[in-house]
Image (cartoon, rainbow, N blue to C red):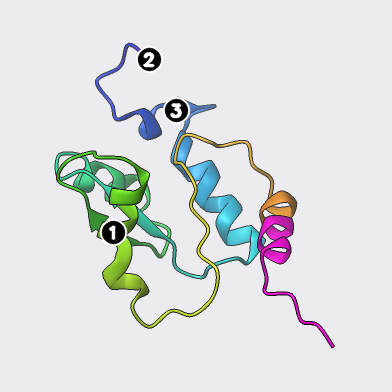
Amino acid sequence: MKSELPKVLNPIKGEPMINYLIKTVKWSGVPERPIIVVSPANKNLIKRALKNFNCCYAVQKEQLGTAHALQKAEPYLRDFTGTVMVLCGDTPLISPATMRDMAIYHQPKRYL
C-alpha cells in the first residue's frame, strides 16, 4: 500500500479502513464489544483510531496467523458461550445485513 500506516488505518474516503468494519459490527448488533487483536507496535495507533468505539484489545506479539490471534483473544472469551465471528480489519465492505445473516446462519439449530 506504500504507506507507513498499518494497513487497517489507511484511509478510505478520509476514514481509517477499520472504522468501516467496526461500524458494521455495531450496526449489525452482532457483538456489543468487539475484540481487536493488534501488534504491540500498532496498538496505540489503532486504539486512537477506534477511540469512539467500545472495543477490547488483545496483543499479538508475533503475527503467527489467525488461530494464534484467536489464542490471544481467548482471555476475553473465557465466559462467553455462543458463536465467535472472526473478521479481518481490512474488509471494510461487509454490510450489516450480511454480518447479521452470517451470525444467524451459524446459530445452533434447534430440532424438535
**Label 3 amino acid?**
Pro
| Residue placed furthest toward the top | 2
The residue located at (44%, 41%) in the rendering is 89
Q: What stretch is highlighted in magenta?
A: 100-112
What residue is drawn where x is 40% and y is 27%? 10
Q: Name the residue under label 3.
A: 11
The kind of residue on which mark 1 rests is Gln
Closest to the observer: 49 or 21? 21
Closer to the chain start, of discs 3 and 2, is: 2
Looking at the image, which residue is at 60% across and 65% down?
30
List the residue tagged with mark 1.
Answer: 71
Q: Which residue is at the front of the view, 54 or 63? A: 63
Residue 101 part of the magenta segment? yes
25 left or right of 78?
Answer: right
| Mark 3–mark 1 distance (CA, rounded to whole Å) | 29 Å
Location of residue 9 by image quarter: top left
- Using the image, determine if residue 71 lies above or below residue 42: below
| Front label number (3 vs 2) | 2
Residue 102 lies within the magenta run: yes
